[in-house]
Amino acid sequence: MEGVIDSLTRDILTRQAGFDWSVTEFVRVVDARLPPRVFYKHCPELTARPVATPSGVPVHLQLLGSDPATLASNARQALSLGAISIDLNFGCPAKLVNRHDGGASLLRQPDRVFNAVRAVADALGGEIPVTAKIRLGFSDRRLAVTCAQATEAGGAAQLVVHGRTRDEGYRPPAHWEWIGKVRHQVSIPVVANGDIWTLEDYWKARTLSGCQDVMLGRSALSDPWLAPRIRHWQLTGERLPDTTWEMRANVLKEYASLQRQKLPDRVVVSLVKQWLAQMRQGNTEANGYFHHLKRMTDLNTLLNALTPNTPLRIPEPA
């Protein structure tokens, strides 16, 4: 979720009940302890107490790296700044990250996953929890269980499992049943992740994985009302109406309003288009608006076009 889940996005997505906690974009750790400003940039929520979104949803700080000692040093730095949890990213499939020995690249050697988690857990001394996220492996699933067990043995208190290997990227389907195989081999809580786009997907992911909880990533951007829809169904057994284009457009307008308070309009235009591109997943209307707006460069023009006076004609899919 690098580049798409900043503090303003977290603020907007958590304004309605649905999320129990959220995670920052990863802080990239290489070979040195990073200065406080880097942590505040990724997690400005650290400047207040509690460390949470404005609506009170806790924010966990995520680190990505491979050197145990450097990860440990930065975890201590984060703790000194008020972090309430350290999440370790062993799931990022990005080629650039993997080429530089980060993210899912460690899944090829479970002992390296163990060493990283153990170093961070030891450095934190139980003052705050360590959690981790993995995929089902790098090129195949043969080491999925071993990697999960390595996180537990290293001291992770919770594990998120994305239901695909690194080589599978984001190609459907997510293998929720394999998350269940992993869950049976560890004693820490396992959270299912991957391809949960609808309420039906949520139920299938829980059923096939046996997990009590799920993590939403791209789907929360695609439909900002997915988490509230799931929570409403959990509490009442009733299904909320589908998210309308007007609801999506209002989210984008609010996002732009917040971003332009600190960024130039030209940058905000790119950010709004980036979120709109995420909304295209499975939504014909959002896809039509994306194609209609993608070449606009003026922010006010773009925002006005999100809710035109006359309905936008949505092209039929080819």
Image (tube, helix red, strand yellow):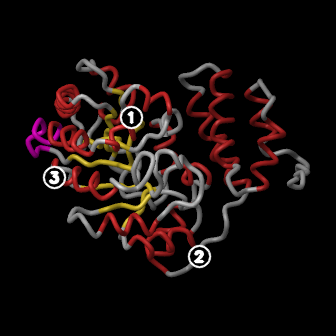
**Residue at the image position 40 percent from the left and 70 percent from the top:** 209
The residue sitting at the bottom extreme is 237
Q: Which mark is residue 239?
A: 2
Q: From the viewer's perspective, is the residue at label 3 or at label 1 nearer?
A: 3
Q: Is residue 32 left or right of residue 302?
A: left
Q: From the viewer's perspective, is the residue at label 3 or at label 2 nearer?
A: 3
Q: Secondary structure at mark 1?
A: strand
What residue is disc 3 on?
153
**Residue at the image position 70 percent from the left and 49 percent from the top:** 280
Position of 274 relative to 246 (above/below): above
Q: Quarter of the image holding residue 61? A: top left
Provide the residue span drawn in magenta: 120-127
What residue is disc 1 on?
26
Give the amino acid at mark 2: Arg
Q: Residues within 10 Å of mark 2 (few under 14, many from 20)?
A: few
Give the amino acid at mark 3: Ala
**Residue at the image position 81 percent from the left and 29 percent from the top:** 295
**Residue at the image position 27 percent from the left and 63 percent from the top:** 189
